[in-house]
Image (spheres, rainbow, N blue to C red):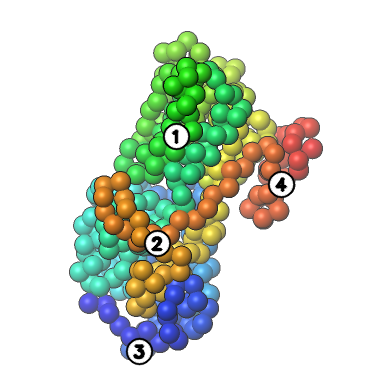
């Protein structure tokens, strides 16, 4: 068991301990946090990683990681390897929430705390840290609905192995249901996107356009990667510019918002999520109970599991508030405004 006496002064909360003292144990060894990434195909995970590294460095803790390359079986092996390396806590971005259980069990057997990062790991032994994904879905649908309150809608969902896909879809439906019931919106098609891959989203969208003779007026896409695939399919048919949603604040997506080919990217500042994950992992490794982590709450999962969780608040970015991400240092103005002529502020 890896239960050790932590020397950092009175680690009573996740967020106070990080700045108080270097992360070290009574036996003299420094703290190491292991991160198991599902993949690095999406731009945003590199931002998350940088934030985690910076927060761990500030706490005097070491960082080790692995990339599952979108393989759930490899991720199980990766976690075993991280445990063998002697990590004191794990942060896991699950490739497949249904398949990650043995990894949580292996960590529990060694007394190693687990932070389920961004994606739900439905196990009460894993602290769940994410943005409010149901609200993200609401924000996506709300922005598309405000742009076009009636017509033929397509729903491009996330990966079927990621619980967030259904959280998002649920939030989207909440916003659209009244208009659907009134006959103003007709959902002509919806599809999951295996692995969240843009190429899969593009292929799905192409097939939907063909099946519906291009009679599509708006697309609620569940992240910026899938939105990119959707916009590519629309552009090939000369349909770019119809309302399309996304999330993550990917630079390419924010540029599409400035260009007018994407309506909204719900910005989940990965810097905040990564920093929080590192701080929580350090606190848990030091003996802080999950319930005592700052801003933690009891939450019941869709499957009825009582979890300890913390939810961060997202921000929808549209053409009306693009300056927000520039002012926050998330993206440089030249990257945001590339190819934009006479667009919204700050690109005008």
Within 10 Å of disc 2 (Cα), the crowding (few <14, some 14-19, many 20+) is some
Quadrant location of the C terminus in the rendered image: top right
- Pinpoint residue 128: horizontal percent, then vertical percent: 37, 58
Q: Residue at x 63, y 53 (%)?
A: 330
The CA span between labels 4 and 3 is 48 Å
* Residue position marked by numbered label 4 in the rendering: 323
Marks 2 and 3, the one that precedes in the sequence: 3
59 to the left or right of 301? right
Q: Is residue 201 visible?
A: no
In this rendering, is residue 199 above or below 9?
A: above
Q: Which mark is residue 26?
A: 3
Question: Looking at the image, can residue 129 be seen?
Answer: yes
Q: Secondary structure at mark 4?
A: helix
Of callouts 4 and 1, the N-terminal one: 1
Residue mark closest to the camera, 2 vs 3:
2
Q: Position of residue 54 (x, y in %)?
A: 53, 68
Residue 174 marker: 1
Report the Cα–Cα distance between label 1 and label 2. Answer: 24 Å
Question: Which mark is drawn over residue 137?
Answer: none
Q: 310 and 325: which one is in front?
A: 310
Query: What x and y, as percent, mark residue 303?
Result: 26, 47
Badge 2 element: strand
Residue 18 lies left or right of residue 69; in this view the side is: right
The residue that mark 2 highlights is 297
Which of the two labelled residues, at mark 1 and mark 2, occupies the earlier sequence position? 1
């Amino acid at each position: 068991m890896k239960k050790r006496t932590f020397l950092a002064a009175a680690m009573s909360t996740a967020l106070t301990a990080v700045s108080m003292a270097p992360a070290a144990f009574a036996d003299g060894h420094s703290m190491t946090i292991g991160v198991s990434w599902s993949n690095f195909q999406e731009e945003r995970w590199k931002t998350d990683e940088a934030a985690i590294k910076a927060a761990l460095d500030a706490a005097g803790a070491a960082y080790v990681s692995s990339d599952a390359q979108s393989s759930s079986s490899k991720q199980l092996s990766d976690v075993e390897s991280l445990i063998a390396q002697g990590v004191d806590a794990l942060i896991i971005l699950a490739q497949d929430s249904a398949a990650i259980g043995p990894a949580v069990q292996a960590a529990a057997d060694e007394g190693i705390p687990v932070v389920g990062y961004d994606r739900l790991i439905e196990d009460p032994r894993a602290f769940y840290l994410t943005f409010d994904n149901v609200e993200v879905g609401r924000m996506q649908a709300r922005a598309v609905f405000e742009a076009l309150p009636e017509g033929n809608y397509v729903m491009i969902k996330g990966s079927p192995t990621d619980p967030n896909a259904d959280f998002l879809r649920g939030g989207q439906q909440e916003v659209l249901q009244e208009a659907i019931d009134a006959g103003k919106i007709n959902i002509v098609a919806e599809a999951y996107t295996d692995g969240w891959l843009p190429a899969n989203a593009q292929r799905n969208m192409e097939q939907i356009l063909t099946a519906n003779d291009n009679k599509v007026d708006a697309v609620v896409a569940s992240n910026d990667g899938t939105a990119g695939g959707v916009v590519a399919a629309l552009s090939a048919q000369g349909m770019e510019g119809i309302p399309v949603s996304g999330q993550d604040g990917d630079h390419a997506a924010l540029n599409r918002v400035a260009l007018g080919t994407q309506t909204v990217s719900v910005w989940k500042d990965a810097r905040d999520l990564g920093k929080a994950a590192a701080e929580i992992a350090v606190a848990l490794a030091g003996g802080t109970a999950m319930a005592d982590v700052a801003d933690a709450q009891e939450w019941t999962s869709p499957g009825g599991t009582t979890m300890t969780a913390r939810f961060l608040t997202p921000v929808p970015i549209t053409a009306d508030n693009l300056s927000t991400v520039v002012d926050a240092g998330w993206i440089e103005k030249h990257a945001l405004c590339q190819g934009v002529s006479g667009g919204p502020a700050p690109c005008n």
